[in-house]
Image (cartoon, grey):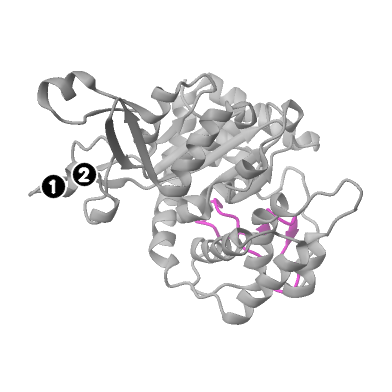
Amino acid sequence: MGQLPFPAIVGQDTLKSALLLNAVNRDIGGVLIQGERGTGKSSAVRGLERVLPERRVVAECPFGCPPDDPTRQCAECRERTTVEVERVPTPVVDLPLGTTEDRLLGALDFERALNEGISALDPGLLARANRGILYVDEVNLLDDHLVDLLLDAAASGVNRIEREGLTVTHPAEFVLVGSMNPEEGRLRPQFRDRFGLQVDAEAPTDPERRATIIEVAEAFDREPDRVRERYRDEERRLRERIAAARDRYDDVSLGADRRRRIAELCLAAGVEGNRGDITTARCARALAALDGRTAVTDADVRRAVELALPHRVPNDPFDDGVDLGDLAADRFGDATADGPTDHPDAEDGGRDDDDPGTGRNRGGSENRRDDGDSTVGRTLRRLRDFL
């Protein structure tokens, strides 16, 4: 049957925004998605593949090396005298819980080593995920040994395999996306901190929204090809929007005053290290770029704080802790001070009056969660129009 189109997923706007921001800037560091089963976590991640822009790669390279950047190429690509270029889809690679070390890292081809005298690699999941997305469902249940290997690769951007005196390395730059049900186990703190953003995926409590989810699912069950065709133009617009945001990102300015206020907020929240500060700044710039702007606003920073800092604030069971919303409002104004970031997958290319992160519209009033809601209503009307 295939995968439900990314724009057809009802609700989960914060989750979808976090995924799109990582599509704009891989250095944000991925997304950790928390939520109970059946809330659309995996559907959103896998649906992202159809809206990601294609990659330019060195033809026939198993790692998808970029043709114009030797510093990010494997040894064979760097030694090529002529480079043929092709465009291929950006992969979303699943890492199953039962994966072995050889399946993750790849295995050395000893037959070629003995016969040809070269260190050859049978590529693994990290090779397939290079310059793409590596998705781990139930990431909190992943074997600790594999977690250590992922942490090493994510930190260095290189996969290194050593067996029987032979060594092979290749680039392994990927966006790590993990989903988990917190009731099934905790995530190691050092692993949680590696995720740039964290979002909670919750089942909606509004009956109309839940009814819309049923209608979308039934329509896709009956006529999946027709549903995919209906959303093909929206997927194309999202791809173009992501590509434009990537081109724009380096031109997005974040003033010295806002950088200082981000640092002050992180200090006040008790965030350890500098990763939270840096990720908040990158996320705010990506929000502006995705919105078609070249300057960060206070609304961008507030939204970035909601995504980048909750999992980095110390959790003391004997203390009520800090309120990130209050800290952000003190330093960047409340949610009605300026226009919030537009919805990332609105039908008109992202210009929408609703802010999925705050549940408020530009006038500051609470959004109505009924058939006219910006996301649910649009999805429901589209399905009724063509079915």
In percent of width and height, residue 190 lies at: 62, 44
Residue 353: tell me if it is visible: no
Residue 75's tag is 2
Q: Is residue 170 above or below residue 363?
A: above
> Residue 361's image quarter?
bottom right
- Does 250 appear in magenta? no
- Does 351 appear in magenta? yes
Residue drawn at 25 percent across, 44 percent down:
74
Marks 2/1: CA distance? Answer: 6 Å
Q: Nearer the viewer, residue 125 or 255?
A: 125
> Residue 276's image quarter?
bottom right
Q: Nearer the viewer, residue 49 or 282?
A: 282
Q: Are dots 2 and 1 in contact, CB under 8 Å? A: yes
User: Looking at numbered disc 1 in the image, what kind of residue is underneath it?
Assistant: Glu
Q: Is residue 211 above or below residue 56?
A: above
Q: Residues within 10 Å of mark 2 (few under 14, many from 20)?
A: some
Span highlighted in magenta in the image? 335-361
